[in-house]
Image (cartoon, helix red, strand yellow):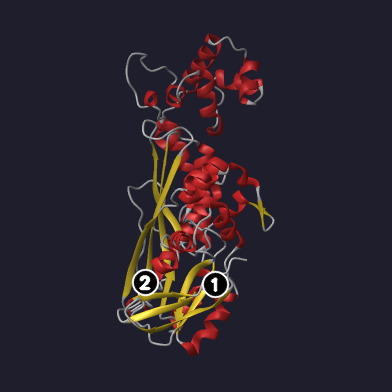
């Protein structure tokens, strides 16, 4: 709640307003207390002006009394014939209380974050005395149609890790250290618990990737979004020394191509999965490796930054590709220099049982599987042969890592040989 709003509250006026609305609805103090799960003494204190309803109860009280939060705090009902923001579905006072709670999850102990919640924009100290030529690495991301499943099956926290891990992976493959994330939450209603869970989870996902959630936007759009629906997006800023950028330009003939394992679908292929679920709803509870189908497909996107950051300053990596939409071929080609070809032996890929299950249930051919899914490979790393074992050891501390191909001269960019093994 904004400080200026708090200073304007009239406890007697608020108390009389609550009492009048309660009586008009035919409730006793005890009946109102039961609906709000508080004591009748609390109701009595509100009505005699001794205390205010706390932030947690304001929205519920407004709903029970059929008024808005703003009307409670003002102690008067708005003109029935006049238009107001609250009548359009947005209570400014209530959304202010939500934003205030967000502050505890922003920035944290990051000394580079120079301000908190409240200013029009976030300030971030971009002074790196140990870097000769720091380069900003910028990226925006959203979790795609996986958000729909998250809302349907209660994976509100999980989808936050999906978005942040995907976002950080995209800049980490260029050798960048993640710094700061800005998020956007668009929803139909100011659902306090949901927004608090989203912001807290986004902040924790950032912390695990050694960066900070520094601010963003929470937009309440009751006339645009359906009730209960939210949309997440985010953007990130990272930094890398200019002469340490990993972009594939150092790739040489004979380099080894390594695969780091995924834990499942990550954040791609969900439109096809949803189509499969619509056609075969019974699969939702089928068990795969001890987990239900829903539990398997809702695993959060793997975070690769912790496993690869130790390779950045050792000149051990010539290129990295984050395997997302488009699969291995559609992403690895983005870092292969002209005149080179990444020869990938599909038979060496350790496909996951989940992908075999989807393939069999949907009668999907291998070409479509490779275009749509990562098929068990979430990250490709190109490294000199002499550094191969060291890189494998480093990444294998976090994820299974193994060789799947080699770089050769050629104009094809990607050459897939043999076939995937479906266990």
> Foreground: 377 or 410?
410
> What residue do we see at 42% from left, 17% from top?
76
Which quarter of the figure is the N terminus placed in?
top left
Label 2 secondary element: loop
Instruction: Tell how many labels.
Output: 2
The relative height of residue 35 versus residue 125 in the rendered view (above or below) is above
Considering every residue shown, the one lying at the far bottom of the view is 386
- The residue wearing badge 2 is 333
Residue 320 % position (x, y): 43, 74
Dot 1, how many residues are within 10 Å of its Cα: few (below 14), some (14-19), or many (20+)? Answer: many
> Foreground: 46 or 168?
168
Specify whether 263 is left or right of 224.
Answer: right
Which quarter of the figure is the C terminus placed in?
bottom right
For the question of whether residue 247 can be seen, the reply is no
The relative height of residue 14 versus residue 352 in the rendered view (above or below) is above
Q: Quadrant of residue 50?
A: top right
Residue 48 % position (x, y): 56, 18
> Foreground: 329 or 29?
329
Residue 375 % position (x, y): 52, 64
For the question of whether residue 59 can be seen, the reply is yes
> Foreground: 121 or 209?
209
Considering every residue shown, the one lying at the far right of the view is 290
Residue 171 % position (x, y): 40, 66
- The residue wearing badge 1 is 349
Between the residue at mark 2 and the residue at mark 1, the CA separation in whole angstroms equals 18 Å
Q: Quadrant of residue 167?
A: bottom left
- Chain-order first, disc 2 or disc 1: 2
Label 1 secondary element: loop
Q: Is the C-beta separation of discs 2 and 1 under 8 Å?
A: no
């Amino acid at each position: 709640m904004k400080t200026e709003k708090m200073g304007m509250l009239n406890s007697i006026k608020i108390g009389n307003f609550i009492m009048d609305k309660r009586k008009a609805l035919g409730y006793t103090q005890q009946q109102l207390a039961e609906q709000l799960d508080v004591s009748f003494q609390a109701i009595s204190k509100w009505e005699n002006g001794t205390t205010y309803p706390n932030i947690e109860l304001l929205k519920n009280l407004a709903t029970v009394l059929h008024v808005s939060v703003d009307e409670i705090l003002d102690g008067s009902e708005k003109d029935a014939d006049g238009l107001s923001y609250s009548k359009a579905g947005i209570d400014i006072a209530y959304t202010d209380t939500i934003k205030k709670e967000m502050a505890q999850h922003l920035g944290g102990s990051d000394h580079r974050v120079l301000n908190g919640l409240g200013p029009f924009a976030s300030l971030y100290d971009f002074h790196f005395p140990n870097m000769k030529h720091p380069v900003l690495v910028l990226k925006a991301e959203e979790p795609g149609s996986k958000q729909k499943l998250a809302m349907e099956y209660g994976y509100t926290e999980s989808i936050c890790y999906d978005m942040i891990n995907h976002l950080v992976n995209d800049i980490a493959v260029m050798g960048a250290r993640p710094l700061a994330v800005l998020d956007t939450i668009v929803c139909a209603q100011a659902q306090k618990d949901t927004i608090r869970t989203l912001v807290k989870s986004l902040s924790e996902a950032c912390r695990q990737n050694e960066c900070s959630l520094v601010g963003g936007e929470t937009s309440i759009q009751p006339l645009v979004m359906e009730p209960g629906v939210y949309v997440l997006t985010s953007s990130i800023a990272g930094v890398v020394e200019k002469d340490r950028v990993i972009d594939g330009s150092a790739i040489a003939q004979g380099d080894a191509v390594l695969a780091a394992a995924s834990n499942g679908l990550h954040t791609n292929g969900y439109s096809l999965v949803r189509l499969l679920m619509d056609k075969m709803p019974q699969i939702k509870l089928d068990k795969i490796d001890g987990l239900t189908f829903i539990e398997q497909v809702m695993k959060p996107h793997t975070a690769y930054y912790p496993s690869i950051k130790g390779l950045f300053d050792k000149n051990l990596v010539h290129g990295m590709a984050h395997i997302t939409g488009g699969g291995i071929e559609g992403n690895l080609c983005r870092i292969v220099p002209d005149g080179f070809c990444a020869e990938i032996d599909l038979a060496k890929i350790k496909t996951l049982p989940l992908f075999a299950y989807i393939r069999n249930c949907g009668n999907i051919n291998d070409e479509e599987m490779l275009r749509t899914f990562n098929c068990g490979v979430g990250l490709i790393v190109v490294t000199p042969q002499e550094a191969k074992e060291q890189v494998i050891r480093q990444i294998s501390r976090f994820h299974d890592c193994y060789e799947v191909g080699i770089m050769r001269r050629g104009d094809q960019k990607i050459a897939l040989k043999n076939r995937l093994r479906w266990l």
